[in-house]
Image (tube, rainbow, N blue to C red):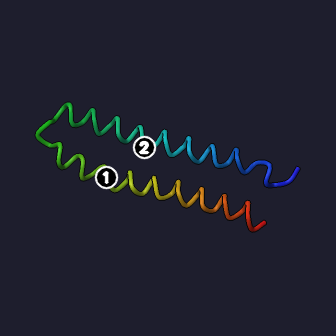
């Protein structure tokens, strides 16, 4: 088997992992805002950076997977 056989599986795992991570962050933020509505702006500001970083890691992982596919 070639290494390129497992690339779609790797890309699927990247997308699933990022989706699960983002959904857990969003669920925790929504629960926190429901408990303390007056702190909604602070909670939203605190959650945005990790969400953006997680999404960036997923995009970089997919880009590297595509690079392995085309340049191997």
Q: Which of these two is toward me, 66 or 61?
A: 66
Which residue has dot 1 on it?
A: 48
Direction from residue 58 to residue 66 in the image, left or right: right
Q: Quadrant of the C terminus?
A: bottom right
Label 1: how many Cα within 10 Å (few below 14, some 14–19, many 20+): some
Mark on residue 2? none
Hey, which residue is sitting farthest bottom in the picture?
Answer: 71
Q: Which of these two is toward me, 15 or 49?
A: 15
Residue at 46% in and 53% down:
55
Residue 49 in picture, x, y percent from top left: 34, 56
Label 2: how many Cα within 10 Å (few below 14, some 14–19, many 20+): some
Residue at 24% in and 36% down:
32
Q: Secondary structure at mark 2?
A: helix
Residue at 67% in and 48% down:
10
Q: Which of these two is toward me, 21 or 6?
A: 6
| Mark 2 → mark 1, Cα distance in angstroms | 10 Å
Residue at 17% in and 43% down:
40
Direction from residue 21 to residue 66 in the image, left or right: right
């Amino acid at each position: 088997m070639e290494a390129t056989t497992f690339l779609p599986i790797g890309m699927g795992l990247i997308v699933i992992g990022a989706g699960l991570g983002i959904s857990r962050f969003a669920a925790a933020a929504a629960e926190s805002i429901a408990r303390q509505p007056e702190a909604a702006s602070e909670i939203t500001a605190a959650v945005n950076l990790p969400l953006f970083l997680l999404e960036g890691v997923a995009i970089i992982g997919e880009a590297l997977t595509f690079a392995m596919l085309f340049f191997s």
